[in-house]
């Protein structure tokens, strides 16, 4: 098992040095994830890779998040990227969102294990956007959930004007990016930044869509329609 010091070294090598307290929290996180993953299948990547593949990758969007932001982690699953960001940036107010009850339960118990405070909601993003939380977050982050045009439709309706949707992707094609830009325009957003990088041998990309006007009330549609008829 990777210890706290080694995790700190890995994060520092990725450009995100942390103190001893954060190193300890990341070690607790890794140990608890390893324990629970065998029972709950929270993530498909072996937990021995977590410091490089999960923790370091999750922190790559920290520079795009303003101080004190309200951050919604859509499809949080095992807590990535939201919980590592919260450990690294305790100033943010985090809400972890997942529609699967066992994952929401894990996220709640993880909060207790780590001794950090964040909200957990068990629901779908498009359901949340139909209620009082529509356009209430300053930032939404999402990692390994769907293609960009789907993420724009489910994510942008939850963000305030002036906020941003931050999408973590692997190697990104120009076709997917162009489709995402088109979908963002229909949902009140525009492309504002890209960050392409290589992390421990893997090509990665972060795409940032700024929320520039209110999302039309017809979006988001039901998820089945979002998937079967993506915005063009």
Image: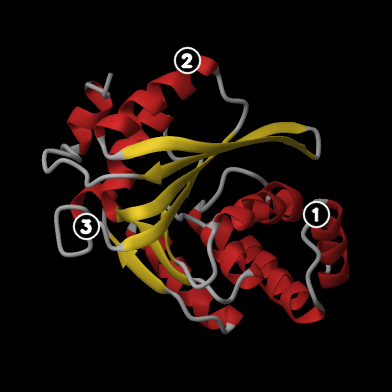
Q: Nearer the viewer, residue 35 or 192?
A: 192
Q: Is residue 92 above or below residue 164?
A: below
Res. 2 in view: no
Dot 1 lies on which element?
loop
Q: Nearer the viewer, residue 62 or 86?
A: 62
Measured Cα–Cα span from mark 2 to mark 1? 30 Å
Left or right: where 188 falls relative to 40: left
Percent coordinates x, y for residue 189 in the rendering: 34, 39
**Residue at the spot 61% in from the left edge and 63% down from the top edge:** 84
Mark 1 Cα-neighbour bin, 10 Å: few <14, some 14–19, many ≥20: few
Left or right: where 133 falls relative to 103: left
Answer whether labels 2 and 3 touch (C-beta < 8 Å).
no
Which numbered disc covers residue 15?
A: 1
Q: Which residue is mark 3?
A: 134
Measured Cα–Cα span from mark 3 to mark 1? 34 Å
Quadrant that contains the C terminus: top left
Dot 3 lies on which element?
loop
First in residue order: circle 2 vs circle 1 = 1
Percent coordinates x, y for residue 132 in the rendering: 16, 64
**Residue at the spot 60% in from the left edge and 79% down from the top edge:** 114
């Amino acid at each position: 098992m990777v210890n706290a010091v080694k995790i700190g070294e890995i994060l520092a090598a990725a450009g995100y040095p942390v103190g001893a307290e954060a190193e300890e929290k990341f070690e607790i996180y890794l140990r608890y994830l390893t324990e629970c993953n065998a029972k709950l299948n929270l993530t498909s990547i072996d937990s021995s890779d977590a410091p490089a593949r999960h923790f370091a990758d999750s922190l790559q969007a920290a520079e795009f998040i303003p101080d004190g932001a309200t951050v919604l982690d859509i499809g949080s699953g095992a807590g990535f990227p939201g919980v590592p960001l919260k450990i690294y940036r305790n100033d943010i107010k985090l809400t972890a969102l997942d529609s699967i009850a066992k994952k929401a339960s894990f996220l709640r118990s993880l909060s207790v294990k780590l001794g950090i405070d964040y909200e957990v909601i068990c629901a779908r993003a498009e359901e949340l956007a139909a209620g009082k939380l529509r356009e209430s977050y300053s930032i939404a982050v999402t990692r390994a959930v769907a293609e960009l045009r789907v993420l724009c439709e489910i994510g942008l309706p939850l963000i305030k004007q002036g906020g941003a949707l931050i999408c973590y992707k692997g190697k990104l094609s120009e076709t997917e990016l162009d489709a995402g830009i088109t979908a963002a325009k229909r949902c009140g957003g525009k492309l504002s930044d890209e960050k392409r990088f290589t992390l421990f041998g893997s090509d990665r990309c972060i795409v940032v869509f700024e929320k520039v006007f209110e999302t039309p009330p017809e979006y988001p549609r039901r998820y089945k329609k979002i998937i079967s008829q993506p915005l063009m």
